[in-house]
Amino acid sequence: MPEDRLALIGKAIDEVAAALSAGAPAGAELDDLAVRLARIWAMIAELDPAIAGRLRDYTANGD
């Protein structure tokens, strides 16, 4: 259900925000944060494939 996925996304975002509030991540913590953000984007893209297309555009322009 989309509502369940949105709840998971919200929880994941809250966890990332809490980790960042604890201080600047470094080393393995930074790698973990990158993995978490990638998972959040994957969940969002699954709910709205158009977002996935826009994300690719942003990544290509940001390189």
Image: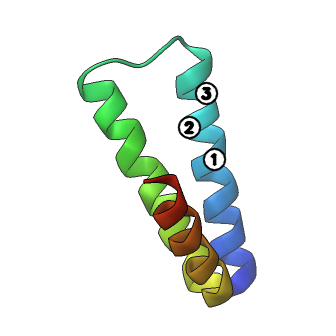
Where's the C terminus, which quadrant? bottom left
| Residue identifier under label 1 | 13
Q: Amino acid at mark 1?
A: Ile
* Rendering coords of residue 3 (x, y %): 75, 78
Query: Where does label 3 land, which residue?
Result: 18
Q: Residue at x 48, y 50 (%)?
A: 37
- Crowdedness of circle 1 by 10 Å Cα count: few (<14), some, many (20+)? some
* Identity, as a three-letter code, of the amino acid under mark 2: Val
Question: How many badges with numbers are in the image?
Answer: 3
Q: Marks 1/3: CA distance? A: 9 Å
11 on left or right of 36 = right
Alpha carbon distance from label 1 to label 2:
5 Å
Residue 9, above or below 32: below
Q: Based on the displayed image, in which of its 4 quarters is residue 9 positioned?
A: bottom right
Viewer-proximal residue, 28 or 11?
A: 28
Residue 43 visible in the snapshot:
no
